[in-house]
Amino acid sequence: MSKKALALLALILIFQAILVFSSPEKCYIGEKEVPCPGSNTINQGTNVDRDWQRDLLPENFMPDERNDPLFISFFIIVLMSVIGLAFLKIKIFDKTLAEYVKPIWGYLLGAFIVASSQYLVLEMNLIMSQFSLLLRLSQGLWALLVGLGIAKLVTKENFNLKQILFAGLLFNIAIMMTKVSIRYFFYGRSIFYVVDRLLYGTILVMFVTLFVGGLLLFLKRNNYKK
């Protein structure tokens, strides 16, 4: 891993440490701690919070309820698919999983750290409204990591468009599967909620992948023609 990538990973860890150790304002009535005015606390426990804004799916697309067997089955299928690709050394678009991961493992790890800490930090009774700016910055950070990883694959590893799309899928697993799993297992969210967020996040990840990868491939081909 290059020194620049190590420096970027170090900055990510520092940024996440700020999230963890920042102390939010606390409000009291007498000796009893209460939510501060204008603050929104994270929903905890296993109850489904039905008051949420949909990004993609229509309101009555599916029941807004939890379904542990369905979600756990999906989670296991994704996990076993990744493990199977790694151990069986199956080639996807002429490359094994190791050949995809090795050049960008630092970016994948950084994206995983950012995505997981976004919600695990909030699980520690922190108030979202007081950290909204940091959360938005962290979302921009994982998007930056996706872009840098894809850029490296195009410029340094000579990946084609199909290979870039599969690399984007790996970033999507590292980011979105982490986020929806935390939302489902820790926050008690419904299947409807996590499916909507998974689709929305996947579109964002693949947009960054296609935009950066497609642009660099276009510029690279034009340079070859000249």
Image (cartoon, helix red, strand yellow):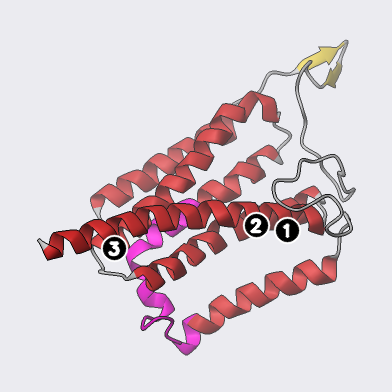
Q: Would residue 60 appear left or right of 24 to someone viewing this image?
A: right
Which residue bears the numbered disc 2?
A: 199
Stretch in magenta? 86-112
Residue 154 marker: 3
Residue 195 marker: 1
Find out whether residue 110 is within the magenta segment.
yes
Specify the farthest residue to the top.
30
- Determine crowd level at label 3: few under 14, some 14-19, many 20+ residues with C-alpha closer than 10 A: many
Mark sitting earlier along the chain (3/2): 3
At x 73% / y 58%, what residue is drawn?
195
Disc 2/disc 1 C-alpha distance (Å): 6 Å
Residue 181 lies in what quarter of the image? Answer: bottom right
Quick check: 165 above or below 191? below
- 223 or 160, which lies in front? 223
Horizontal and vertical percent for residue 87? 49, 85
Circles 3 and 2, Cβ within 8 Å, touching? The answer is no
In this rendering, does residue 1 appear at all?
A: no
Mark sitting earlier along the chain (1/3): 3
Q: Quadrant of the C terminus?
A: bottom left
Q: Secondary structure at mark 2?
A: helix
Q: Secondary structure at mark 1?
A: helix
Q: Quadrant of the N terminus?
A: bottom left
Q: Would residue 70 appear left or right of 5 to someone viewing this image?
A: right
